[in-house]
Image (cartoon, rainbow, N blue to C red):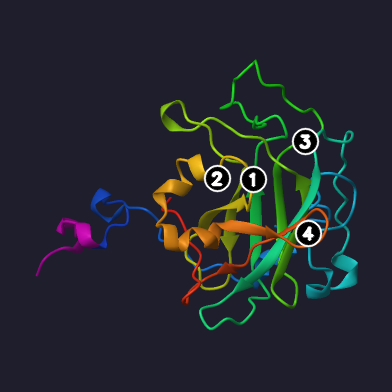
């Protein structure tokens, strides 16, 4: 009979074995993120309001986060961007979240990766925001119309927002863009040109009222939004 002390460990049972190491799999995102990710004012990149979070999804005593604290008024045209998040059947997704990232009105990002000294940084504009969708699946931001930024090969990109969509059942965030219908530069934008012509409309917001732009984000179906690989 073999002495247990003489047995060699089975690598398949050893959780320190490098053969078992690997990337931790992604997990689906659920409505729980409304407790911590969106914040009051997170969707208002211009002023001080409580846009962004969903107070109806948690108890009043937990509604204690501070509002955003803008340092001043950003330069540029103030706009509202909004739309619905829809599933493949066209039903609203009421517990998703949208993030935006954009350049300022002069076309510069608030990022160390954008080191163009010839383009000014706006000290009052961050360029990042989060908005939870409401009970009808609508997201909404107040922000600044972005300026044009450089693209590949010396080109200039049209004004746009980078959007990320999070929601129940999505293993990873979905990345897309919002362009603005009728603005100069859309026809020459190098990224938009990579999208089949028949599907470009899924990335182009249309004006709806004074200063408001509307773009639905569709997770499937005939009007499915073009999402980009990460």
Q: Residue at x 15, y 63 (%)?
A: 3
Upstream in sequence: badge 1 or badge 3? 3
Q: Which residue is mark 2?
A: 186
- What residue range appears in magenta? 1-12
The disc placed on residue 125 is 3
Between label 4 and label 1, give the one nearer the viewer: 1
Q: Residue at x 73, y 77 (%)?
A: 136
Q: Is residue 180 left or right of residue 134?
A: left
Upstream in sequence: badge 4 or badge 1? 4
The disc placed on residue 52 is 4
- How far apart are the alpha carbons under marks 1 and 3? 22 Å
Q: Residue at x 22, y 61 (%)?
A: 12
Between label 3 and label 4, give the one nearer the viewer: 3
Q: Is residue 16 left or right of residue 198?
A: left
Q: Is residue 156 visible?
A: yes
Q: Which residue is mark 1?
A: 183
The number of numbered badges drawn on the structure is 4
Quadrant including the N terminus = bottom left
Upstream in sequence: badge 2 or badge 3? 3
In reply to whether residue 69 is colored magenta, the answer given is no
- How far apart are the alpha carbons under marks 4 and 2? 29 Å
Which of 77 and 47 lies nearest the eye of the viewer?
Answer: 77
Do the numbered discs 2 and 1 sit on residues whose CB atoms are within 8 Å? yes
Which of 221 and 94 lies nearest the eye of the viewer?
Answer: 221
Looking at this view, name the residue that lies furthest to the top: 117
């Amino acid at each position: 009979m073999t002495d247990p002390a003489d047995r060699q460990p089975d690598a398949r049972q050893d959780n320190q074995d490098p053969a078992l190491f690997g990337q931790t799999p992604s997990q689906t995102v659920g409505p729980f993120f409304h407790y911590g990710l969106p914040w009051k004012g997170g969707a208002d990149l211009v002023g001080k309001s409580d846009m962004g979070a969903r107070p109806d999804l948690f108890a009043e005593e937990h509604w204690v986060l501070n509002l955003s604290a803008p340092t001043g008024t950003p330069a540029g045209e103030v706009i509202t961007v909004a739309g619905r998040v829809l599933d493949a059947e066209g039903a609203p997704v009421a517990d998703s979240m949208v993030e935006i990232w954009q350049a300022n009105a002069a076309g510069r990002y608030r990022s160390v990766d954008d080191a163009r000294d010839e383009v000014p940084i706006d000290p009052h504009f961050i360029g990042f925001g989060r908005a939870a969708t409401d009970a009808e699946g609508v997201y909404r931001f107040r922000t600044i119309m972005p300026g044009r930024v450089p693209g590949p090969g010396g080109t200039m990109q049209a004004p746009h927002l980078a959007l990320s969509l999070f929601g129940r059942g999505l293993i990873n965030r979905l990345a897309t863009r919002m362009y603005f219908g009728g603005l100069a530069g859309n026809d020459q934008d190098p990224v938009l040109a990579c999208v089949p012509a028949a599907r470009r409309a899924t990335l182009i917001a249309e004006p709806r009222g004074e200063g408001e732009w509307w773009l639905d984000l569709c997770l499937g179906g005939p009007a499915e939004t073009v999402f980009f690989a990460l």
